Image (cartoon, rainbow, N blue to C red):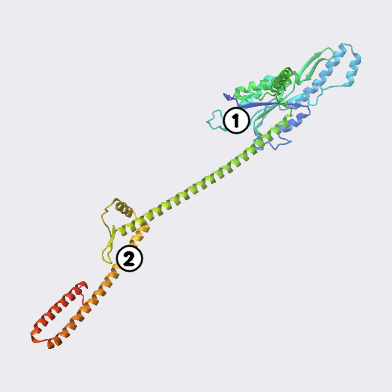
Amino acid sequence: MSYHTPVFSHASARHPIVLRFAEMRLEDLAKFVMHAERAGGDLSHVDPLRQNKNEHLIGDRDWVDLAKKEIEYMRVANFHEELLALKKRKRRKDMEARILEGLKDPWRASKGGPLREVILTANKDWFAEAEESDVLFSEDEKRAKEEQFKAHAVKWLKARFEADVIHAHADHDEMACHVHAVIMPRHEKKSARRGTQQTLQPSSHPLLESYEDAQDDVGAFFEEIGLRRGAKGAEARREAMRANAKARLIAGETGAEPVLQDIPKRREHVPTPVWWQTEILRLQNEAEALVRDQAAASRSKTEANQKIEKAKSAERAAKQRESAALEREKDAASVLAVADAVSSGELQFEGADHDVKQVLTEPQTSEEAITQETLKARSPRAVRLLQSLQNSFAQMRVKSDKLAEEKLATEAKAVRASAKAIESLKDAILKVVPQAARKRVLAEFLRVGQSAKKVEEKLRKSHGGRDE
């Protein structure tokens, strides 16, 4: 497998490199392999569709059997070396006692065991972040970053633990790419009593002996690809303890109450499987919280949009009311202008009943000019009012003409009746009038008859030449 991949460097590393150590007994190897091969245990956090992406990085495929055989060889070789040393020193009784004890494990008895599991990983966001902030990160670039991370992990493990790294593999089917490794910390001891002893001694490795030194070392090593060291808990505790010691010293000299700092709690060692399960649970909780926050934000956005839409609707309704009020105001002004123009005589109705027209007189004042301008932009109500006035004027003309005709007809009849009455009286009057006065009476009757004819002619003309 080639690890020549592009280096992704960052001017300012935001994510820490995660390094965890866990104690491991020989009997834990079977459980480790079972989980690595996804053959059992809690697999709720594993994506089965990505299991084929997991890789073997360091060691032989039968590394567990090889480790057990090597440990068995150590037991036998150490036993032989110790017997030879006792024989050389002529310690027969000790030699006999040792033979009775038989083979021993090549490590000091402890609760945790002589092997160490190592886990190396980083926050999943580091694998998903693009090198350039304005560039969309692609799957190819993500895979390249995973290759870069694995290459650095292998390089660091081999450089720091050399052949003691008996196995390493990379998991891609969990939350973030991570590397598991197993360290078999071989150490050789020589003494006159026991000879050369092959042991498993984690404290013989400086980085296994000092967790803080290991964090410093791995942080510096992975800085090249944009990861940084995690928080320095031990140093923070030492600084706080030094500050508190100084505060107590000053308080003892001055009699004042010392102001003490809180000492950060020592991070307790957690077995890697337990830590990883806790980390997965934490990430799941964060994801669920993010989903809840997004849902709340979505609800807030929906509510905000509803409020905005309601405000817009209210604004539209207000504008409609304002527009309606303006239209009513214009309508009222137009109607008043019609009334003022009619009452002042600026607007007159002329013509016969079948052809009545609206006539505007020439405005004499600025007020009349404003009124007539308003009339030109008349509203629907004003138009209806003008039409109503026009119709009323036409009806009045019809009614007036009818009354005038009736009056003229009556007058014509009266004139004719008077003429007939005078004509019928003429002979009777002439009989009784003296001869000398007849000529003057006839002239008077002639004058009255001519006057009656003139009146009748006028009536005929006023009736359009019609006879009644």
Task: Answer with the quarter of the image where residue 86 lies.
Answer: top right
- Residue 327's disc is none
Image position of 73 with respect to 364: above or below = above
Q: Which residue is located at x 47 percent, y 50 percent?
A: 317
Q: Pick whichever, 105 or 13, lies toward us.
A: 13
For the residues carrying marks 1 and 2, which lies nearer the camera in this image?
2
Left or right, 319 with reference to 68: left
Could you say which is closer to the camera, residue 5 or residue 428? 428
Q: Name the quarter where the N terminus is drawn.
A: top right
Expressed as whole percent of the image width and height from the top left, the position of residue 187 reads 76, 18
Query: In the structure shown, which secondary structural element does the residue marked by tag 1 occupy?
Result: helix
Secondary structure, mark 2, is helix
Q: Residue furthest right?
A: 93
Q: Position of residue 399 (x, y in %)?
A: 30, 70
Which residue is nearer to you in this view: 391 or 219? 391
**In the displayed structure image, the side of residue 117 where residue 414 appears, left or right:** left
Near-viewer residue (98 or 19) = 19
Q: Quadrant of residue 207?
A: top right
What is the three-letter code of the residue carrying label 1? Arg
Q: Specify the label residue 392 is tagged with.
A: 2
Q: Tell which residue pokes out farthest to the left in this image.
A: 436
Characterize the local packing of mark 2: few (<14), some (14-19) or many (20 or more) Cα atoms within 10 angstroms: few
Q: Quadrant of residue 24?
A: top right
For the question of whether residue 468 can be seen, the reply is: no
Q: Is residue 384 above or below residue 119?
A: below
Would residue 157 appear left or right of 188 to someone viewing this image? Answer: left
Which residue bears the numbered disc 1?
Answer: 143
User: How would you rate the neighbour count of disc 1 (Cα within 10 Å): few for under 14, some for 14-19, many for 20 or more?
Assistant: some
Quick check: can you spot residue 231? yes
Q: Quadrant of the C terminus?
A: bottom left
Q: Could you say where residue 465 lies in the image, as x and y percent from the top left?
A: 19, 74
The residues bearing labels 1 and 2 have C-alpha atoms spaced at a distance of 94 Å
